[in-house]
Image (spheres, rainbow, N blue to C red):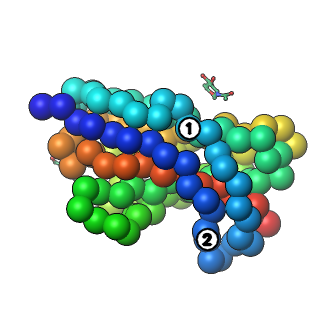
Amino acid sequence: DQITMLFAALLSLTLWFKVSFIFVRQDPSDIIIKASSSIQIFCSHDKTDFYLMLWYQQTPGHTDMKLIGYLHYSATTMEQKYKDDFKISGDLSGSTAKNGSLMIKKAEQNSSAVYFCAASKAQ
Ligand SMILES: *[C@@H]1O[C@H](CO)[C@@H](O)[C@H](O)[C@H]1NC(C)=O
Ligand SMILES: *[C@@H]1O[C@H](CO)[C@@H](O)[C@H](O)[C@H]1NC(C)=O
């Protein structure tokens, strides 16, 4: 079985942190992998004072984006449902360009989705 994943940048839209709008780069942007394999995708941007990075999953046939988890400075918070299968890492501390990652530890058929990365200027 092949699992298709698409990665896209997203405008930041968070309610509990100050909202800011920027585009981020994501690498790779489109990938097909085998079931049970793992993959790490990166999201980077040049907004040096953006200390929050969020990851979302949009599954086929759904318009809503589910929050997988987020990175705030170097602390990761995962949503319960995604805790076992995903890992978010990176360090957004310091006034340098940002680079965070989402790892899908073991891709299953239900990993087929569009993944979004968002950045925000969290306080
Ligand atoms: C982000 O970090 C990864 C791993 O350290 C690296 O391979 C990648 O090139 C970095 N991306 C950018 C845009 O710096
Ligand atoms: C995806 O499927 C696997 C089993 O195939 C299951 O363990 C996992 O909880 C599912 N993940 C989600 C987000 O539904």
Location of the C terminus (image quadrant): bottom right
Residue that appears at 21% across and 49% down? 110
- Mark 2 or mark 1: whose residue is earlier in sequence: 2
Residue 102 drawn above or below residue 79? above
Q: Position of residue 39 (x, y in %)?
A: 39, 30
Q: Nearer the viewer, mark 2 or mark 1?
A: 1
Q: Are marks 2 and 1 in contact (CB under 8 Å)?
A: no
Q: Position of residue 7 (x, y in %)?
A: 44, 42
Q: Element type at marker 1?
A: strand
Judged from this view, the residue extending furthest toward the left is 1
Q: Which mark is residue 26?
A: 1
Residue that appears at 48% across and 30% down? 28
2 left or right of 22 in image? left
Q: Amino acid at mark 1?
A: Gln
Give the quarter the ligand 1 occupies.
Answer: top right
Q: Element type at marker 2?
A: loop
Q: CA distance from mark 2 to mark 1?
A: 19 Å
Q: Which mark is residue 14?
A: 2
Q: Position of residue 53 (x, y in %)?
A: 62, 53
